[in-house]
Image (cartoon, helix red, strand yellow):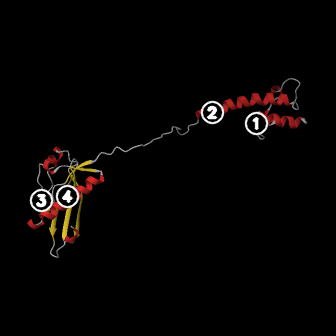
Amino acid sequence: MSDFRKTSELLTMSGLKQGGLQQGDLQQSDLQQGGGWADPVAWATALSRRGLMLGAGAGALSALVPRPAGAVLRLEITQGNVAAMPIALPDFVAGAPSEIDVARNITGIISNNLKRSGLFAPIDPAAFTEKITNSDAVPRFADWRVINAQALVTGRITRQGDGRLKAEFRLWDVFAGQQLDGKQYFTTPDNW
């Protein structure tokens, strides 16, 4: 086997690839006495020492280079912990005495739907301290905070001239003391 081939195998076994250290990079003093450039053992010894010094220097310099944090954050959610929001739904105000039953039924349907969603816990109307008589007036939020209502729905049902029902409501944030939303819907009496 030629000296060049032995040297190539030693370079490969030492982990150095072609294009790494070349003959001009080594000094005569790096080689063992009497080995010369053609001696594969001298090459391996010189490359090992040189490679070790270069590797240690590169490792020390790489520690000084800033790099992004490598921390891994792993969250595992196995169950939800959502508590139902306490909500107050006083009976909607009727536009006329003949609409009181319709207003009460609509309030009951809304309350039952919210309860069945699991996201809301309607408060028992017997606990209400304020009676809503005008759905356009700002409620007394302190009265609703006392019973721990986080949200309040007020509304009004009126019959229009063409016979349709108009349902209006306002959603209030009790703790912030402000209106969150307000809507109105029209429907035929047959839907109730």
Give the CA distance from mark 2 to mark 1. 20 Å
Give the camera-side residue of 61 and 135.
Answer: 135
Are the residues at dot 2 and dot 1 in contact (C-beta closer than 8 Å)?
no
Relative image position of residue 77 (x, y in whole percent): 42, 43
Give the CA distance from mark 4 to mark 2. 73 Å
Element under disc 2: helix
Q: Tell me, for residue 108, which label it has, or none.
A: 4
The residue under label 3 is 134
Q: Pointer 4: residues within 10 angstroms few (<14), some, or many (20+)?
A: some
172 lies left or right of 129 = right
Element under disc 1: loop
Q: Tell me, for residue 16, which label it has, or none.
A: 1
Vertical relation: 177 (above or below) 50: below
If the image is split into quadrants, where does the N terminus sit?
A: top right
Hey, what amino acid is under mark 4? Gly
Please report whichever mark, 4 or 2, sits nearer to the chain's N-terminal start: 2
Element under disc 4: helix
Give the CA distance from mark 1 to mark 4. 82 Å
Please report whichever mark, 2 or 1, sits nearer to the chain's N-terminal start: 1
Hey, what amino acid is under mark 1? Leu
Give the CA distance from mark 1 to mark 3. 88 Å
Please report whichever mark, 3 or 2, sits nearer to the chain's N-terminal start: 2
Vertical relation: 167 (above or below) 88: below
Q: Tell me, for residue 61, which label it has, or none.
A: 2
Residue situated furthest top in the rendering: 33
Give the camera-side residue of 144 and 165.
Answer: 165
Residue situated furthest bottom in the rendering: 162
Relative image position of residue 184 (x, y in whole percent): 22, 65
Relative image position of residue 181 (x, y in whole percent): 25, 58
Q: Tell me, for residue 179, which label it has, or none.
A: none
If the image is split into quadrants, where does the C terminus sit?
A: bottom left
Hey, what amino acid is under mark 3? Asn
